[in-house]
Image (cartoon, rainbow, N blue to C red):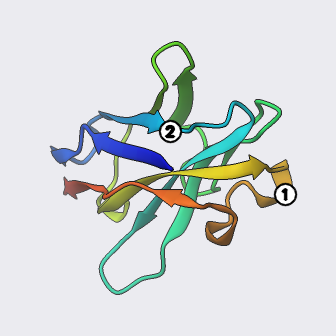
């Protein structure tokens, strides 16, 4: 089993920045896909950013140029740096990991992921 714990959410004004962290523990797999997803009220959970099993990063069009995903393997921690935040970025943000290798095609697809954190709330006011 893998445990994922997110932190770093909060309330900011439009144009502000936040950095989310996700600490992974347990039976982590070195070639996992790791991703950030978000779910706004009344909407489906969507992929925001991911690192695939080959180490390539992928972003949803809505966050390209504003968000950066990274990971510190030594600390087993995944990060999401969010800049130029907009009110439409308001959502619960979840960290996720796969059990197995996953390619770029699947890295932003919710069904690819096996493990999920509890989420951290991000609220952006205008």
Residue extending farthest to the top is 74
Q: Is residue 82 visible?
A: no
**Which quarter of the rendered picture does the C terminus lie within?**
bottom left
Q: Earlier in the sequence, mark 1 or mark 2?
A: 2
Q: Look at 50% across and 38% down and name the residue there.
A: 67
**Crowd rating for badge 1 (residues with CA inside 10 Å; few <14, some 14–19, many 20+):** few
Q: Look at 76% across and 30% down and name the residue there.
A: 55
Q: Look at 59% across and 61% down and name the residue there.
A: 114
Residue extending farthest to the bottom is 42
Vertical placement of 111 versus 83: above or below?
Answer: below
Q: Position of residue 51 (x, y in %)?
A: 67, 38
Vertical placement of 90 versus 71: above or below?
Answer: below
Vertical placement of 23 versus 12: above or below?
Answer: above
Q: Position of residue 124 (x, y in %)?
A: 22, 54
Residue 70: which quarter of the image?
top right
Between 18 and 86, the one lying in front of the other is 18
Between 104 and 125, the one lying in front of the other is 104
Q: Gap in Å between the C-alphas at discs 1 and 2?
A: 20 Å
- Left or right: 98 in relation to 25: right
For disc 1, the marked residue is 105
Q: Position of residue 24 (x, y in %)?
A: 44, 36
**Disc assigned to residue 67:** 2
- Tell whether label 2 touches label 1 (CB within 8 Å): no
**Crowd rating for badge 2 (residues with CA inside 10 Å; few <14, some 14–19, many 20+):** many
Q: Is residue 111 visible?
A: yes
Q: Position of residue 77 (x, y in %)?
A: 45, 27
Q: Nearer the viewer, mark 1 or mark 2?
A: 1
Q: Look at 30% across and 34% down and name the residue there.
A: 17
- Left or right: 104 in relation to 4: right
**Badge 2 element:** strand
**Badge 1 element:** helix
Between 10 and 94, the one lying in front of the other is 94
């Amino acid at each position: 089993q893998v445990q994922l714990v997110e932190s770093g959410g909060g309330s900011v004004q439009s144009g502000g920045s936040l950095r989310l962290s996700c600490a992974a523990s347990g039976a982590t797999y070195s070639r996992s896909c790791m991703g950030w997803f978000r779910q706004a009220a009344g909407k489906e959970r969507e992929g925001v950013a991911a690192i695939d099993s080959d180490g390539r990063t992928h972003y949803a069009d809505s966050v390209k140029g504003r968000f950066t995903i990274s990971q510190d393997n030594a600390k087993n921690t995944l990060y999401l740096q969010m800049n130029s935040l907009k009110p439409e970025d308001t959502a619960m943000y979840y960290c996720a990991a796969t059990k197995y290798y996953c390619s770029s095609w699947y890295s932003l697809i919710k069904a690819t992921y096996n493990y999920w954190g509890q989420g951290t709330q991000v609220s952006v006011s205008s």
